[in-house]
Image: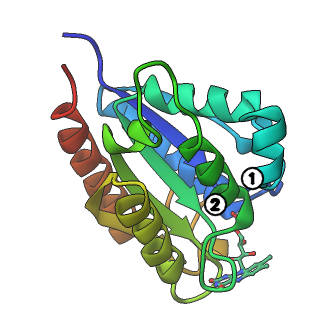
Amino acid sequence: MAALKILVIPGSLRTGSFNARLAAAAVKELALLDVEVTLISLADYPLPIYDGDLEAKSGVPANAVNLKRMIGAHHGVLIVSPEYNSSVPPLLKNAIDWVTRVRDRDESFGQVFRERAFALAAASDGKFGGLRLLMALRQILALGCGATVIPKQVALSFADQAFDEMDRLRHPADASLLKATLRQLIATAQQTMI
Ligand SMILES: Cc1cc2nc3c(=O)[nH]c(=O)nc-3n(C[C@H](O)[C@H](O)[C@H](O)COP(=O)(O)O)c2cc1C
């Protein structure tokens, strides 16, 4: 059987981003779990702020199509995002909005979300670890896009102290929650494999 493919998308472009570091820790863990893993940066998919007039005039930008196809080439997706003002950063929300506007041949809008499993993680230097972002993002993906979002999730609080000098998660409870979340993502994504 072909290998299960998991895509990891950090929701921050910031140098030294805690979420990018958590995403990198997840990539290492996924490699140990015998899946094919791809880590991307949304910096490689720059998109204008969604505007219906722009879409009507110029169509969906090539980067939205590319991002949609990148998602479509995987069985499961892990999004690791910061929380901004208790919600989803515009970088990530805008990317999701554009991807829902992509319709490849014989597909309906947003089909790429409905056909695969998503897992969510967040890191914040605050005490809630991005918990409200996780709720908001779950609503967007599950209710808005019809995605299967697995129940397990990671909210990494006090992220400024959560990593050791090798960028591994310092606390065993954090490492084991990440592992359990990834295992559940893999198990759920396997059900979408043909
Ligand atoms: C505009 C803005 C709003 C923020 N709002 C929140 C928030 O609501 N909750 C929170 O825990 N952290 C909040 N933060 C702090 C971020 O969690 C922190 O900057 C974090 O390091 C960003 O993630 P990154 O390290 O992956 O870039 C906010 C930061 C910014 C820039």
Image x and y of residue 156, in percent: 50, 72
| Residue 9 drawn above or below residue 35 | below
Name the residue tied to disc 2.
93
Q: Residue at x 31, y 37 (%)?
A: 115
Residue 82 lies left or right of residue 172; in this view the side is: right
Residue 97 lies left or right of residue 181; in this view the side is: right
Q: According to the image, what is the colour scheme of the structure? A: rainbow
Going by the numbered disc 1, the residue's amino acid type is: Gly
Q: Quadrant of the N terminus?
A: top left
Residue 98 lies left or right of residue 37; in this view the side is: right
Say which quarter of the image contains residue 4: top left
Image x and y of residue 145, in percent: 42, 55
The circle on residue 183 is none
Front residue (pair 31, 164): 31
Q: What element carries label 2?
A: helix
Q: Which residue is drawn at 50% across and 82% down?
A: 132
Q: How many dots with numbers?
A: 2
Name the residue tied to disc 1.
52
Front residue (pair 164, 126): 126
Does residue 172 appear in this view? no
Q: In which quarter of the image is the C terminus?
A: top left
